[in-house]
Amino acid sequence: MRYDTRIVKTALITGASGGLGEEFAKLFSADGYDLVLVARSRDKLEKLATDLHAKHDITATVIPCDLSLPNAAKNLCEELKKRNITIDVLVNNAGFGAYGPFAETNYEQEKSLLQVNIVALTDLTKLLLPDMVKRRSGNILNVASTAAFQAGPLMAVYYASKAYVMNFSLALSEELRGTGVTVTCLCPGPTRTGFEAGAGMTASKLFKAGSMDAMTVAKIGYDAMKAGRPLIVAGLLNKIGTFMTRLIPRMFAAKVAKWVQSPM
């Protein structure tokens, strides 16, 4: 039980059952934030909540939620109201990819991708942002990707979804200037989170070439959020790569992306 009088803030993290989401949870809890952990897997969330409470004496609330379902964000926010939980930081981390030629991929999977990567992220921001503005305090951290900077053959829908996340985040960041609320967009490159297995692209050159550690990427995004930076690309090589996309024709960049994402 806490006996101090400090104001404890609460961070809601989607996709918190593993990968970047789990690492974000560790970072926020180490700084004394209470947490709302959201993902589909109750067991993984409860184990993480128990571990973080024991280590940092924070409150970690578990709310299992499948963000690929319509009205998932609305239902989640209604649950927060029932529990009288105020969200000071929103981390829109949940997301996944789909790999293969668009003419051959499973469209039901891609519709779920759009629901999670775009619709749920936008819904949660729409529902939680107004109260942050009223309080003149809050942070939103959206996880996009270096994929946001170009077209991505063999992952066309995923790349397009991350372009939305980046541009949406940058627009909000400018709109919210001077309100006390910041929006940060984190753009990782290949990261060891299990993403590649879920997307079915473990054989692609992109991941065979190497990837960053999840905690390293999460810390880069976390520090950028605390600094109020609108956009951060994780890693020097990724920074160079995204800069180069500005200097070459878009279709050439698309050809390069297709080659990189093709199997070894």
Image (spheres, grey):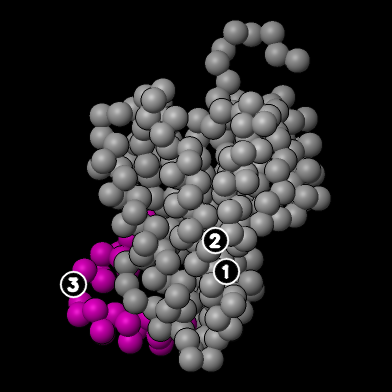
Amino acid type for the residue under numbered disc 2: Val
Residue drawn at x 68%, y 51% is 65
- Identify the element where label 3 is drawn: loop
Mark closer to the chain start, 2 or 3:
2
Tell me whether the residue at label 1 lies in contact with that at label 3, contact meaning CB atoms closer than 8 angstroms. no
Q: Magenta part of the protein: which range?
A: 233-262
**Residue plotted at (71% across, 55% down):** 40
Q: Residue 11 sits in which quadrant?
A: top right
Badge 1 local density, few (<14 within 10 Å), some, or many (20+)? many
* Left or right, residue 64 beside residue 188: right
Element at label 2: helix
Asked if residue 243 can be seen in this view, the reply is: yes
Q: Quadrant of the N terminus?
A: top right
Query: Does the stretch in magenta take in 105?
Result: no
For disc 2, the neighbor class at 10 Å (few under 14, some 14 to 19, many from 20) is many
Figure check: 132 above or below 2: below
Which quadrant would residue 63 be assigned to in this image? top right
Closer to the eye: label 1 or 3: 1
Circle 2 is placed at which residue position? 116
Magenta segment, prevailing SS (helix, strand or loop): helix
Residue 119 position (above or below residue 170): below
- Whole-angstrom CA distance, mark 2 to mark 3, is 31 Å
Quadrant of the rendered image containing residue 234: bottom left
Label of residue 247 in the image: 3
Q: What percent of the width, then of the height, locates residue 235?
A: 41, 57
Label at residue 112: 1
Is mark 1 in CB contact (under 8 Å) with mark 2? Answer: yes
